[in-house]
Amino acid sequence: MSRVRGATATPAEPIWETRERPWLVSWNRRLRHLHSLAVRNLTLSQSDRRSRAKIADDDAVPNTLRSPAKLLALREARTIGHSKSSDDLRPLKESLGPDRQASKQQPNGLQQVSVVDTKARRPNGFRLRRRSTIDWASATPQRRQKRMEDVSAARLADVFFSLHVQGVEDPIYVSETVYKTMNPTFQHTSLEECGGPGVARLDTVTVKLWVRTTAQKKFHVLLEMTLNLRSLQFIGKDLASFIHPFPPNSIIFELSDGFYTCFTNAQVDEPSNPFVVTRSKISSPRTLRTTSFDALLRLSKLDDSIQDAFALREKLSHDLSTLVESSRQPLIDKDHLNESMDYFKTVEYAKAAVDKQLKTLRHTRDEKRYTLARRRELLSCGRSEITTGATEMVSTEDEMSEVRTDLSLLRRSISNQRRRISSDLGTIFPIAAIPDKPLSFTIRGLHLPDSESLDSSPPDQLSAALGHVAHALQLLSFYLRHPIPYPTHPRSSTTIMTDPISNLRPPKSGTSTASPYPTTVPRSLSDPTRSFPLYARSSGPRYRFDYALFLLNKDLHVLLSDAFGVRVLDIRQTLPNLMYVLACMAAGEGELPARKAGGVRGLLRNSVSQVPDQDESKFGPISPGMATSFIRGHFGGDVEERLGPKYINAHRKPRK
């Protein structure tokens, strides 16, 4: 706390030291001079100050108990005295045995004589080590770090302080909180703005130190000190120059002229009469000037001006508060007016939104009214048509019985004609079994094996037989009025099968392959990816022929299962399945009708009224004249009298 004057002084010259002194005398210290506080050596638990029964020696350490390792070390060090200091540890050369010491020789070849007394020699053969006095000396670094953190956490805490004066219930100042610290230093403040001039002139204050550890949730008072600023001891203008240690929980006050503290174990020496002039120790040869009366008078006037300014500020604050209090009601009314205006704008916005919704609802209502009127009109038309239809139905009830009778006759005639056609197809395409070969058949004298034995017949004979089967299948589909999913295009031994329904990928090449067929063929034949030859080629892939044969067998399977409800056991038996179709078609009672000239009887009427457009495209259109000639040939010349001209004209109308 001292500074040296004349650093270049010679030893003969005296060195004068000036001790730092406060600017404020003890009786002039007030709260307005207090700027900040600091705490040093924060201690949360009180140390045990009880008197010990014995001296603090190494024997008092808990880890010096008589363990087996310690007993062995004590036996090796019998000559060690009561002191456990490092001064009594023997040098390493004394631990050597007498034999090893005798073996050492001097540089001139003579042996070195041992000076160690035989009484003080230690046991031979071992090199003693110094015992560790720390119980966790061999601990891992993690354990050391954990223990250091635990020790630090026991000393660190969250700290803040509050200042109280007599006569005021609430604290005049509450500092900020410093977290996890042991030596907190708080921010500067001015107490003149906290409590006014009356508080700033006081010299007695109560300091409460509030702390909270990591294990606690609330702050509690660690230290409460009521002191007079006159009892503070000046320690310097800078804490860094104070070299003496602080006691636990030391509170340091920073005033305008330096740092002060209150040592509880120190005696404050204050003169009973501070105005008595005493001669102080001369620390400097130069004379210091004191404050003049004019300066003190100016300071007094300045203090009066400051107090007047404070009083004026209080008066202005009071006048402003009175003015605000008197004009509170107009301000409240103005706030209410603003709120009402905001509410009015909100209502207007809501009204506009509701008007828009109302307009939309009205438009929707008008549309629904128009729709309802249109529906009522349609309902009235429908009711009139229903009434007309019911009237016509009542008037034609007598004719319906005759029509039903004619319909049953037509169905029976159609069935008989199909039986006759089946017989004719069996005559045109005769299917015969081969003797001594089960499930082997011929069609028109050509042997057709099943799908697994195709190589047993010549390719030309096989292609011709398959062409006959495809032709017969096409005719059966026409006469039974049952389309097949995979159409056939019979051309004798060069028959083509088409697949219009499968998901077949086009060829990978970008250019389309020109079709070898004429342009008058159906569109399915113009697509080479969907047409498959029903004949074995000498060159080309075999799988296309196999797939065409599979499509043919699938058509037979569909015709049997859908037209007659017959279960097919094996679709690979082509000729047996075809013969089965002919047998099912020829089944019936009575004799077969004879064939008459003038068209096919029994099929034209249903073909005109029920065959869809796709069948007409396959089998050709049926004209109304053909239907009329068929009806007259079947029922006789008086068909118009029996069925009526209205019935005949209805069937003469072309289909849309």
Image (cartoon, rainbow, N blue to C red):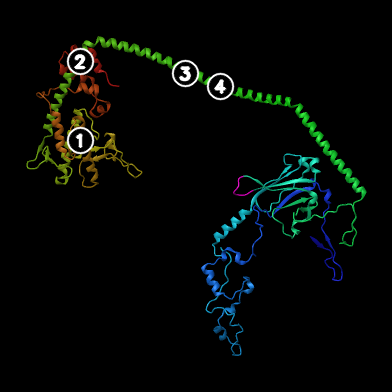
Q: Are marks 4 and 1 in contact (CB under 8 Å)?
A: no
What's the CA distance linking mark 4 and mark 3?
A: 20 Å
Residue wearing tag 3: 367
Residue wearing tag 4: 354
Looking at the image, is 274 positioned above or below residue 283? above
What's the CA distance linking mark 1 and mark 3?
A: 56 Å
Q: Which mark is residue 403?
A: 2
SS for dot 1: helix
Question: Looking at numbered disc 3 in the image, what kind of residue is underneath it?
Answer: Glu
Residue wearing tag 1: 557
Counting residues from the N terminus, which is met first, the one under dot 4 or under dot 3?
4
SS for dot 4: helix
Q: Quadrant of residue 289?
A: bottom right
SS for dot 3: helix
Q: Which mark is residue 215?
A: none
Looking at the image, is 268 positioned above or below residue 97? above
Q: Closer to the observer: label 4 or label 1?
A: 4
What residue is drawn where x is 60% and y is 66%?
Answer: 59
Question: Looking at numbered disc 4 in the image, what kind of residue is underneath it?
Answer: Val
Residue 236 shows in the view = no
Counting residues from the N terminus, which is met first, the one under dot 4 or under dot 1?
4
Counting residues from the N terminus, which is met first, the one under dot 1 or under dot 3?
3
Relative to 311, 593 lies left or right: left
Residue 598 drawn at (x, y percent): 15, 22
Task: Classify mark 3: residues with Cα within 10 Å, few (<14), some (14-19) or many (20+).
Answer: few
Looking at the image, how many numbered discs can be counted on the residues? 4
